[in-house]
Amino acid sequence: MSISRQLVSFAIQAGSSDIHLEEGAPIAIRVNSDIRILDNVLTTQDMDQILKELLESDKQEYFQQNHDLDTSIGIEGLSRIRINAYVANERRCLTLRILPDELPKWQKLGLPQPFINLSLKHHGMVLCTGPTGSGKSTTLAAFIHCILEQQRRHILTIEDPIEFEFQHTEKSIIHQREVKRDTHSFATALRAALREDPDVIYIGEMRDLETIQLAITAAETGHLVLGTLHTASAAKTVERIVDVFPGDQQEQARLQVSTSLLGIMSQTLCKNTSGKRSLAYELLINTPAISNLIRERKISQIYSQLQTGNKDGMNTLEQCLQKLMEEGAITSKEALSKASNPKAIAVQSQEMQRG
């Protein structure tokens, strides 16, 4: 059995999400958010062999020249893995993210129904945000899977790299494009996408001004646009999108976002009391009240709208954490560490104790 196959097989059995490899150093794995360091030391020869097993010759050459590489592959019979190769302290390193071997279903992930209902929309922008490793790609993969199974759509994805591999279904078709392999950049692929007759466009990461501009244009011109950003809350997501525009264009951008946005799910993963991980999220649905706040530059008031927007399916991250605490799924310490507004958790926790 190859070294890489042994490593991935061991990590899956250990319930690991990531494998960290560095030549001349012990192997490490991440299990339920915690790093665990193993006794095995990876030699230079081991790293040579692993790179040969995981990377095609052109990608090996690219890594040697650039010292950075991001790609993904499937290991037959085991799992699909995302590979990030880099150099640190003049040593070659690999981070292997183990992806689910089955396409995720939204019910199993615990995604909220109001968020999934947005998959029925025919145009507008749906965003999933959060820190690295918070499950954004998994959430949107479940969202796409729901569309593929229930609707008659053409879905086009632009990713770097492709994480989940989809197949056409009896109702829908899907085409997945990988940046650097199938297209030059996110922006290049997005410009072309408007001529490829998609109903749904998934953008792996909305990184820059041009990509965000094109995403908004696509949402305004009859496409359902899905995207991810590294922001910690719904309000910060709106601010980030508007702030990326030059000052003289921000007013127009604010108006466009207020009308094209459908919803934002900002999420994180918490260590739960069972030793696994639970999803916690903040959900914004773009109601007329939210749209007005965006248009009128009152972003700071969005949080209070989320607090009182339960009838529209909205909630703050703190309300979700509070519910997980009440169910005994997470500890108060974990809730406080994940909260954007820890004072809200502290107040609610005190009220629980008094009750």
Image (tube, rainbow, N blue to C red):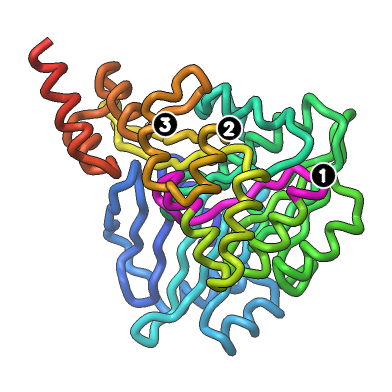
Residue 353 against residue 285 in the figure, above or below: above
- Mark 1, other Cα within 10 Å: few <14 / some 14–19 / many ≥20: some
Q: Report the front residue among 249 and 80.
A: 249
Frontmost of labels 2 and 3 is 2
What segment is highlighted magenta in the picture? 219-238
Do the residues under discs 3 and 1 have CB atoms within 8 angstroms? no
Q: CA distance from mark 3 to mark 1?
A: 27 Å
Going from N to C along the chain, the mark reached first, 3 or 1, is 1
Q: Which residue is mark 3?
A: 306
Q: Amino acid at mark 3?
A: Leu
x and y, in percent, of residue 39 in the image = 27, 60
Residue at 15% from the left image edge and 32% from the top image edge? 346
Residue on which the image places disc 1: 222
First in residue order: circle 2 vs circle 3: 2
Whole-Å distance between the Cαs marked 2 and 1? 20 Å
Quarter of the view holding residue 73:
bottom right
Front one among 337 and 177: 337
Relative to 338, 208 lies left or right: right
- Determine whether the residue tagged by mark 1 lies in a helix, strand or loop: loop
* Picture layout, residue 86 above or below residue 277: below
Amino acid tagged 2: Pro
Tell me the number on the disc at residue 288: 2
* 3D distance between C-alphas at marks 2 and 3: 13 Å
